[in-house]
Image (tube, rainbow, N blue to C red):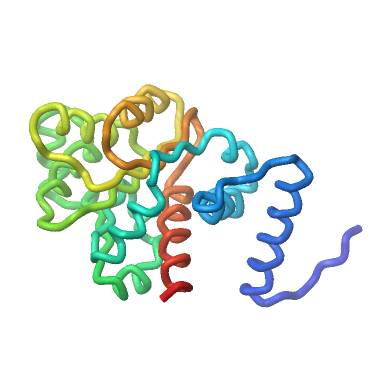
Amino acid sequence: MKQIEHLQPEEIEKRSFAIISRELESRGICLPREEAMITKRVIHTTADFDYTRTLCYAPGAVQTAKELILSGADIVTDTNMALAGINKKTLAAFGGEAHCFMAEEAVARLARERGTTRAAVSMEMAAGLEKPVIFAIGNAPTALIRLYEMMQEGDWRPAFIIGVPVGFVNVEAAKELILETDVPYIVNRGRKGGSNVAAAICNALLYELSRGA
C-alpha cells in the first residue's frame, strides 16, 4: 500500500506539474513553449495525456489571448460550472469580467419560443457585449455552431474562441466548424473536453499573465 502524504495545496500542484513534465519527457513529447503551460494545466485537470495530440492552437493563439486579457476582455462561458472554475479575481485585475447567460430568464424564454437551445441564445446575448469577448465553450456544441452561424450571417467576429465541448452528438463537427474560421482559437479535436477543461485553459492564461505582472 502506498503511503499517503499530507501536503499543502500549492505543494500538491507543484508536484503534480513536475510529474506531468517527467511523463511528457518519458513519452518523448516536447510541447511548443507558448502552448506548454496550457496543455499541462489541461492534463493536470483531466489526468489525460491525449490532449497533447488533440489540442489545436491557431497560429499565435496564446499571444493573442494574452493580449486580449491584458486589454480587459471579458470571458463568456456556456455553463455556470465553467464560470465557477475561472479565477475571476485575477481576471478582474486585468479589467475583465466573466459571464454565463444560461440561467437568464430571457434566454430560457427565447430558446423555448424558437425551439433552440439556451446555449445558442446565450451566444447571441454575449455578442451584444460592448467589449472584446473570449468565448470559453466546454459543454454545448450548439454554442459553437451558433457562433459559426453568426459569423456567416454578417461582419461580427468573436475576439477568441476556446472550443472544448464534450460529448457524442455534433461535438466533433461543431469543433471542425471553428477550425475553418479565421478567428483565433484553442480547440480540442474529438469528443473530449468539458467545462473543467474550458476553465483550465482560461486559468492557465490568467496565471501566466499574473506571474509576469
Q: Is 211 or 7 nearer to us in this picture?
A: 211
Q: Is residue 206 left or right of residue 148?
A: right
Q: Is 24 or 74 nearer to us in this picture?
A: 24
Residue at image position (66%, 60%) is: 17
Where is residue 174 shown, x and y percent of the image? 34, 27
Where is residue 150 shown, x and y percent of the image? 15, 33
Where is residue 72 shown, x and y percent of the image? 24, 65
79 w.r.t. 18: above or below: above
192 w.r.t. 24: above or below: above
Residue at image position (57%, 39%) is: 51
Residue at image position (19%, 54%) is: 132
177 w.r.t. 35: above or below: above
Q: Residue furthest right?
A: 1
Q: Is residue 35 left or right of residue 25?
A: left
Residue 202 visible here: yes
Where is residue 63 shown, x and y percent of the image? 38, 54
